[in-house]
Image (cartoon, rainbow, N blue to C red):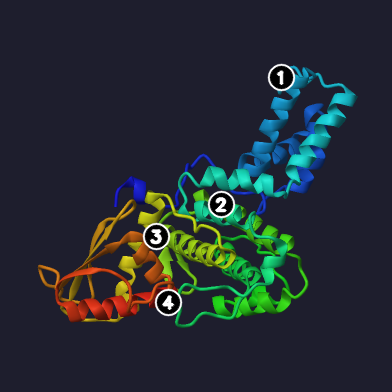
Amino acid sequence: MGDDKVGCIGPMHYRPACHRKGHVMDCAEFAELVSEFLDGALDVATEMRFVEHLADCADCETDLARMWETTRLIGALGTPEQPQLGAPARDRLLSEFRHWHHDTTTEHWLQVLRDASAWCPYAAQVLALNTLLDTVPESEWQRPVRYRWSNHAPDWTVGNLISRLSAVDSLLAQRLGLDPVLPGEAASAADPLIRTESVLAADTSPTPDLIRARWFAQAARICLTLPTIPPATIIDMPVPLPLPDTMARRAFETWVHAVDVADTSGAAAPTPQPRHLNAMAGLGVRMLPRAFGQRPGATVEVILSGPGGDRWTVALGPHPPARPDTRITMDVIDFCLLSGGRLDPGTISYAVEGDSALAREIIAAAPAFAES
């Protein structure tokens, strides 16, 4: 794939987020020392630790940049090298800095995800689902989910879907070195299903706002950390995949559950941007051998039409032929819904050239991608 299909690796000027382990100075201490730093009152060793943390922490770097901008606007500071900040202005500035530093509101994380959505399909789908949730009244969170189609649909509510996303994302967060915040003993479970069940069992009283805030903030922290992780890193949760494919898979599940929420609430389901849809669909096609099983000597060509569509040739086992045994053509959204277990393989519309029996078997097996 070309550079526009890499999917999740963003601008490398980001630095590790402040909540990662291993910093000599943590963010709380950094915030407490800002006033002394501005006054030039730190000793050499502490100032070095302060600067080292700043160089290693994207959150504090951003906050300090905002702080300098604020001081410029209020006209109370000369230059970072020669501060001339009076006590009232310093107190106001420090208060604003601490507000930014400890800001865990939706607006704070919203900006993080907006920035990441330019290069990460997962961030874009989190934003789309979050926008959709704005239209869902709190009373609807306990409504059973209405699925378009599913062989193994769990008996979940809208709130359960968000808890499910939070649970699986937390496993990714741990793989990336972050500390997930989960209720009960959920964080000790390595299996996504067991972790989900633990979260659902513990989520007996939290309000929709708390469940949603936990999911949304965790998604933003994940996206803030991604550019620090080498793209070739294999993430095992439980299917081992390179980081870009892992993020495409998380985008895929987030979008599928957004479709579930939309269908349940009567809203319009979000449509991913073509480049993000391409990354999600491409992963689904490449995972067909896992969903279908090995078929030595067989190859399928999949042609997906519509914005975000493409053409892929996939060997279903060793010794693939020079030409595909069968060619399947369908709409890219339909393929993603099929792979996500939301369209009935027996009723989906598609065209076939070549081995029609093999094509039917592949179509029937495609929803297994949602469970693998």
Q: Answer few, some or many: residues within 10 Å of disc 3's Cα (few below 14, many 20 plus, some between 14 and 19).
A: many
Task: Pick whichever of labels 4 and 3 is earlier in the sequence.
Answer: 3
**Residue at (82%, 21%) from the top-left corner?**
85
Q: What residue type is labelled 2?
A: Leu
Q: What element carries label 4?
A: loop
| Real-space CA distance between mark 1 and mark 3, rounded to the nearest whole angstrom | 48 Å
* Distance from the alpha carbon under mark 2 to that under mark 1: 38 Å
Point out the tag, 2 or 4, that comes first from the N-terminus: 2
Under circle 3, the secondary element is: helix
Q: Distance of mark 1 from mark 4, alpha carbons?
A: 56 Å
Residue denoted by label 4: 372
Q: Which of marks 1 and 4 is in front?
A: 4
Name the residue that disc number 2 marks: 127
Point out the tag, 1 or 4, that comes first from the N-terminus: 1
Q: Which of 216 and 347 is in front in this view?
A: 347
Dot in front, 1 or 3: 3
* Vertical relation: 228 (above or below) 202: above
> Dot 3 corresponds to which residue?
280
> Dot 2: few (<14), some (14–19), or many (≥20) neighbours within 10 Å?
many
Circles 1 and 3, Cβ within 8 Å, touching? The answer is: no
Q: Name the residue under label 1.
A: 79
Q: Which of 348 and 68 is in front in this view?
A: 348
Circle 2: element type: helix
Q: Where is residue 317 in the image (x, y as percent from the top left)?
A: 22, 77
In the rendered image of this protein, does residue 71 appear above or below residue 341?
above
The numbered mark, 2 or 1, whose residue comes first in the sequence reads: 1
- Helix, strand or loop at label 1? It is loop
Task: Tell me: residue 45, above or below residue 304.
Answer: above
